[in-house]
Image (spheres, rainbow, N blue to C red):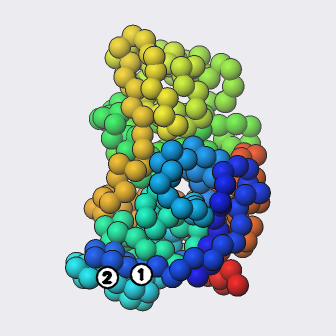
Amino acid sequence: MKAIGLTEFGGPEVLQVVDLPTPEPGSGEVRIRVHAVAVNPTDTTFRAGRRAAQLADRTPPYIPGMDVAGVVDGVGEHTDGRLAVGDQVIGLVIPLGPHGGTYAEQVVVDQRSVIHAPKGTSAAAASTLLLNAVTAHLALDALDLNTPRAVAITGAAGAVGGYAIQIAKSRGVTVIADAAAGDEALVSTLGADHVVARGDDLTEQILGIAPNGVPGLIDGANLDGAALAAVADGGAVATLRGWNGPTERGILIHPISSFDAATDTALFEALRDLAEAGTISLRLAEILPATAAAEAHRRLAAGGTRGRLVLDFETGLS
């Protein structure tokens, strides 16, 4: 089979079409014929070598990708019968595993990491759900907010930020969200109660709404320590890129990793059900051919994309 991979770490230009043996599902695994793959920031950091040490004992090519949508075309032994050949599914894949990531015509996945796709959606749209919605869910859980408490969300127009707004609102939490010029309507449509302008005075604007600070903040804009002033004494910050302090005034930091929930089938199904109900919106920006993976990485790094770029693998790489 063919895949998009890399033999050395670097910029987007290292991505290339590679030939790999067709993978066979083992015990407790299923194989997916890949139709669509969402391109995420984790893919770009993987390509650039952030996970190089964890791949040191692996032989290249290395295959990026965590989100996938497609059709089950193989089922291994000792599976639970939940998935069958022909099922339309989505999955969350850890690209550090023995089978690599999702930028491939076929991918073998632990059955626990695969669920039936949301009904009535395209593979491209469905592929945008799991990684970003799981991250948003984990961030909100880490903050341990209860109504009528509030959360501030930076980077609110992004894929994780958008899901965080909608999941928070489904829990009855008040949302203060930032927005760059031109994104105010989007962020409001997603359900934010208060929209503040992105900029150097962001924390002052948040304090204008919550004078004592918010009890929780999801830092989707990677503000790190610059966001602390907006958080109440003894509050908490969920960070998405690994920053872990130092903090002040008893504020707790919760670095969030979707790897921690990669086999949480029940969570995936709950998020899928929210998507089917329209409680959360699938965030598809544009579909590109799989061979345009390098261009997708460049565009993601440039910023400004609302939703996710998706690579189309349904037509194959031949």
Estimate the x, y position of residue 180 in percent, counting from the top left.
70, 36
Secondary structure type for disc 2: loop
Please provide percent x and percent y for residue 80. 22, 78
Name the residue beneath numbered marker 2: 76
Q: Is residue 104 above or below residue 172?
A: below
Q: Nearer the viewer, residue 108 or 72?
A: 108
Location of residue 20 with respect to 201 vertically, above or below = below
Q: Residue at x 65, y 68 (%)?
A: 4
Residue that badge 1 annotates: 24
Upstream in sequence: badge 2 or badge 1: 1
85 vs 192, nearest the viewer:
85
Position of 164 relative to 150 (above/below): below
Q: How many marks overall? A: 2
Please name the residue shown 51% across and 50% down the image: 56
Q: Quadrant of the N terminus?
A: bottom right
Using the rendered image of the protein, determine whether residue 167 is visible from the camera's viewpoint: no
Mark 1 and mark 2 in contact (Cβ < 8 Å)? yes
The picture quadrant where one finds residue 130 is bottom left
Query: Measured from the top left, where is residue 210 in percent x and y?
Result: 47, 20
